[in-house]
Image (cartoon, grey):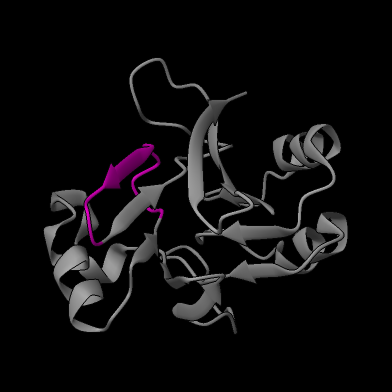
C-alpha cells in the first residue's frame, strides 16, 4: 500500500497535481491542512481515498479539525497541529496522542518536514509543497509504504 502525505498547499495545487501524475497509483492521499478551499479539487485529482483536515488558514471550511482512522495496524491522528502549539515542539502533540491511543500522528502547519520515530509512536510532518520554510526551501512530501508484513516505512522526498 502506498500513501502520499502532503500539507500546506494553500490553494496552489500545481505541484500536487504533478506529483500525483508521477507517483500514480497511490492508494490513499492524506493532506494535513491548509488546502485553502481546494479540497474538492484535491479529491478530484487524487483518484483514491482522501483524508484532509482544516488548517489555520482554512477559513469557513467544513473540514474537520482532526481526523482519526486506521491504516492497517496503525491508529492514525491527522491534525494540522496549530491547536497543539506545534511551532514550539512536538511534545504536547505526542503526549495527547499517546493518551488517546494513537501510534501514528500526522501534522502540518510549520511548513518544515519532520519524521520522529519513537518505539511506541511515529510523528511526522511532510512539510509544504507550496511554501517550504526549511533550509533550502525545497517543496517536500512523505511517501508511506506498508510492506507485506504490515510494517510502515516512511520516505521524506523533495520535488
The structure residue drawn at horizontal position 75% and vertical position 58%, both measured from the top left corner, is 27
Residue 48: x percent and y percent?
81, 63
Left or right: residue 66 compared with residue 9: left
> Which residue is nearer to you in this view: 9 or 145?
145
Residue 53: x percent and y percent?
53, 71
Left or right: residue 90 compared with residue 64: left
Residue projecting furthest to the front: 149
> Which span is picked out in magenta?
108-120
Residue 2: x percent and y percent?
68, 49
Residue projecting furthest to the top: 136
Q: Is residue 18 magenta?
A: no
Left or right: residue 58 compared with residue 25: left
> Which residue is nearer to you in this view: 62 or 70?
70
The structure residue drawn at horizontal position 62% and vertical position 70%, both measured from the top left corner, is 51
The structure residue drawn at horizontal position 34% and vertical position 41%, both measured from the top left corner, is 115
Which quadrant is home to the N terminus?
A: bottom right
Q: Classify residue 135 by image quadrant.
A: top left
Which quadrant is home to the C terminus?
A: top right
Residue 86: x percent and y percent?
23, 56
Q: Is residue 116 above or below residue 15?
A: below
Left or right: residue 34 compared with residue 12: left
The number of callouts visible is 0
The structure residue drawn at horizontal position 58% and vertical position 78%, both measured from the top left corner, is 61
Q: Is residue 119 above or below residue 143?
A: below
Most prominent secondary structure in the magenta stretch? loop
Amino acid at each position: 500500500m502506498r500513501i502520499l502525505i502532503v500539507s500546506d498547499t494553500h490553494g496552489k495545487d500545481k505541484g500536487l497535481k504533478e506529483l500525483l501524475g508521477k507517483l500514480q497509483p497511490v492508494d490513499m492521499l492524506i493532506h494535513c491542512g491548509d488546502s485553502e478551499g481546494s479540497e474538492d479539487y484535491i479529491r478530484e485529482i487524487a483518484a483514491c481515498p482522501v483524508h484532509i483536515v482544516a488548517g489555520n488558514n482554512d477559513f469557513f471550511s467544513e473540514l474537520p479539525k482532526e481526523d482519526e482512522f486506521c491504516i492497517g495496524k496503525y491508529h492514525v491522528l491527522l491534525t494540522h497541529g496549530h491547536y497543539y502549539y506545534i511551532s514550539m515542539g512536538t511534545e504536547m502533540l505526542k503526549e495527547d496522542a499517546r493518551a488517546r491511543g494513537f501510534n501514528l500522528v500526522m501534522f502540518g502547519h510549520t511548513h518544515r518536514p519532520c519524521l520522529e520515530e519513537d518505539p511506541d509512536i511515529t510523528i511526522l510532518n511532510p512539510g509544504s509543497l507550496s511554501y517550504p520554510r526549511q533550509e533550502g526551501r525545497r517543496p517536500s512530501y512523505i511517501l508511506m509504504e506498508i510492506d507485506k508484513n504490515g510494517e510502515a516505512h516512511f520516505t521524506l522526498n523533495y520535488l
